[in-house]
Amino acid sequence: MKKIEAIIRRAKFEEVKEALHAIDIQWFSYWDITGAGKEKEDMVVRGQLFESNYIQRRMISIVVRDQNLDKTIKAIMESAWTGELGDGKIFVSTIDETYRIRNGQSGPDALY
């Protein structure tokens, strides 16, 4: 099992969500995050334009079976891509165990 964490543009979230649903990834967690990087983002506050290096993004976290890893990464990359600086990052790590709290089921079958 693998855990995929993807940091994407907020504006691309709906496209990424639809791409994940299209490959039968029905459940994932997400949250809004703020980061600091090379990119600058313009913000309008009370009619004034400010340049900020604090970037608003959305992080998606998904745990998948090994056989779903490549198609999940491909779906995220294709749907989140703009070709511009700040498209995001994808991190993959190994998950040793998974447990379903409701019935005690464990292993890859506990994911779905």
Image: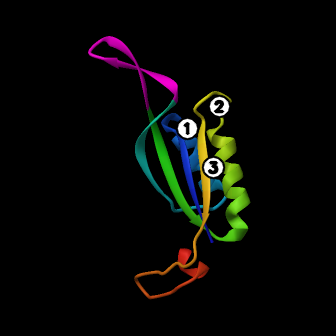
- The circle on residue 82 is 2
Magenta residue span: 38-54
In the image, 81: left or right of 31? right
Q: Give yes or no for contact between labels 2 and 1 (Cβ–Cβ under 8 Å).
A: yes
As drawn, 54 above or below 105? above
Label disc, if present, on residue 19 of the rendered structure: 3
Which residue appears at 55% of the width and 61% of the height? 62
Crowd around label 2: few <14 · some 14–19 · many ≥20 (10 Å): few
Q: Amino acid at mark 3?
A: Ala
Q: Residue type at mark 2? A: Thr
Category of crowding for the residue at label 1, using alpha-carbon neighbours closer than 10 angstroms: few (below 14), some (14–19), many (at least 20): some
The residue nearer to you, when weighing 99 against 27, is 99
In whole angstroms, how far apart are the C-alphas of marks 1 and 3? 11 Å
Element type at mark 1:
helix
| Position in image of residue 9 (x %, y %) | 53, 37
Residue at (68, 53) in percent of width and height:
73
The residues tagged by marks 2 and 1 sit, at their Cα atoms, a distance apart of 9 Å
Q: Earlier in the sequence, mark 1 or mark 3?
A: 1
Amino acid found under the numbered disc labelled 1: Lys
Decide: is 46 above or below 104: above
Asked whether residue 112 appears in the rendered view, the answer is no
Which element carries disc 2, helix, strand or loop? loop
Residue 12, labelled with which disc?
A: 1
